[in-house]
Image (cartoon, grey):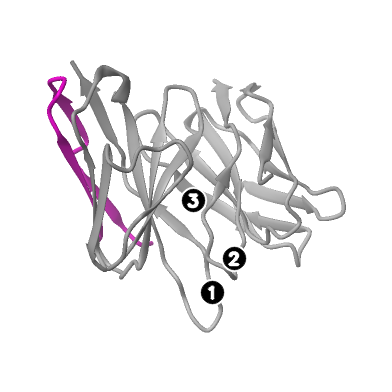
């Protein structure tokens, strides 16, 4: 079954701290792993994505760590800011077949000032 | 980045009426668009995959006669909620995939969503 498990469900971090959100997948055919950020009443926006040929990708304060053998990947938000408060979704898909995204359950992140 | 525009942003309709939601890719052609439904504090649930020029593919449990999808051009897909009822009230979101050759890129761009309230 194509599932993506995401944790934690909610996360509270102090300003300047590190936010870490984890995801695990089952389907070894997945080869594209994006993270999306969603603000209330808005559609999701792509934050950062990784493919399994690398173990880490960094863009600004956002880093994806990928562990292919464990079938896990995580999002790290460094120097978290109140403006980062949003819901974050991990997702996975099979790139070459152009298939649809399978989303995790989401993590509600709150960054306190 | 690519832009996907969804209209309307919110709509209130009476029970029994139909509502049409439009999803447009503004600066790229999208042969495939996806329609999602999202309940409060929940994840996105894929409803159907919309392919230009062909019938949509619906996920299990989604009534195709209730949620009509039309993808008549490479930049427009529409979702019509027919005979809407209060339980259809939800946040509907479309997305379009932008493929770049020679390497396929499954980057998906999402519309801003449509809040449907059926009273």
Q: CA distance from mark 2 to mark 1?
A: 7 Å
- Percent position of residue A84, x then y: 52, 34
Q: Is residue B118 above or below residue B35?
A: above
Q: Decide if residue B72 is in sight here.
A: yes
Q: Decide if residue A77 is in sight here.
A: no
Q: Which residue in the structure is indicated by mark 2?
A: A95
Q: Reply yes or no: does residue A65 show up in magenta.
A: no
- Percent position of residue B30, x then y: 34, 66
Q: Residues within 10 Å of mark 1 (few under 14, many from 20)?
A: few
Q: Secondary structure at mark 2?
A: loop
Q: Secondary structure at mark 1?
A: loop
> Toward the viewer: B87 or B105?
B87
Left or right: where B90 falls relative to A79? left
Residue at x-position 57% and y-position 26%: A109
Residue at x-position 56% and y-position 39%: A89
How many numbered discs, if any?
3
Identify the magenta region: B1-25
Q: Chain of mark 2?
A: A
Q: Which residue in the structure is indicated by mark 3?
A: A46
Q: CA distance from mark 1 to mark 3?
A: 17 Å
Disc marking residue B104: 1
For the stretch drawn in magenta, what is the main secondary structure? Answer: strand
Left or right: where B110 falls relative to B73? right
Nearer to us: label 2 or label 3: 2
Q: Chain of mark 3?
A: A
Circle 2/circle 1 CB separation < 8 Å? yes
């Amino acid at each position: 079954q194509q599932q993506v498990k995401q944790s934690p469900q909610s996360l509270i971090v102090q300003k300047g701290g590190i936010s870490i959100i984890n995801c695990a997948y089952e389907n070894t055919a997945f080869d594209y792993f994006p993270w999306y950020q969603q603000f209330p009443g808005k559609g999701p926006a792509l934050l950062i994505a990784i493919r399994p040929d690398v173990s880490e990708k960094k863009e600004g304060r956002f880093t994806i760590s990928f562990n292919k053998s464990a079938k896990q990947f995580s999002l790290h938000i460094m120097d978290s800011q109140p403006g980062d408060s949003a819901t974050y979704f991990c997702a996975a898909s099979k790139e070459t077949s152009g298939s649809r995204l399978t989303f995790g359950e989401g993590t509600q992140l709150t960054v306190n000032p | 980045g690519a832009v996907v525009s969804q209209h309307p942003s919110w709509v209130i309709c009476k029970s029994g009426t139909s509502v049409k939601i439009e999803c447009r890719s503004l600066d790229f052609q999208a042969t495939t668009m996806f329609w999602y439904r999202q309940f409060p504090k929940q994840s996105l649930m894929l409803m159907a995959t919309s392919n230009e020029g062909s019938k949509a593919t619906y996920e299990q449990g989604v009534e195709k006669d209730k949620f009509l999808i039309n993808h008549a051009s490479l930049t427009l897909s529409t979702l019509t909620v027919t005979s809407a009822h209060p339980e259809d009230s939800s946040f509907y979101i479309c997305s379009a995939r932008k493929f770049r050759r020679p390497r396929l890129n499954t980057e998906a761009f999402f519309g801003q969503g449509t809040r449907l309230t059926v009273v």
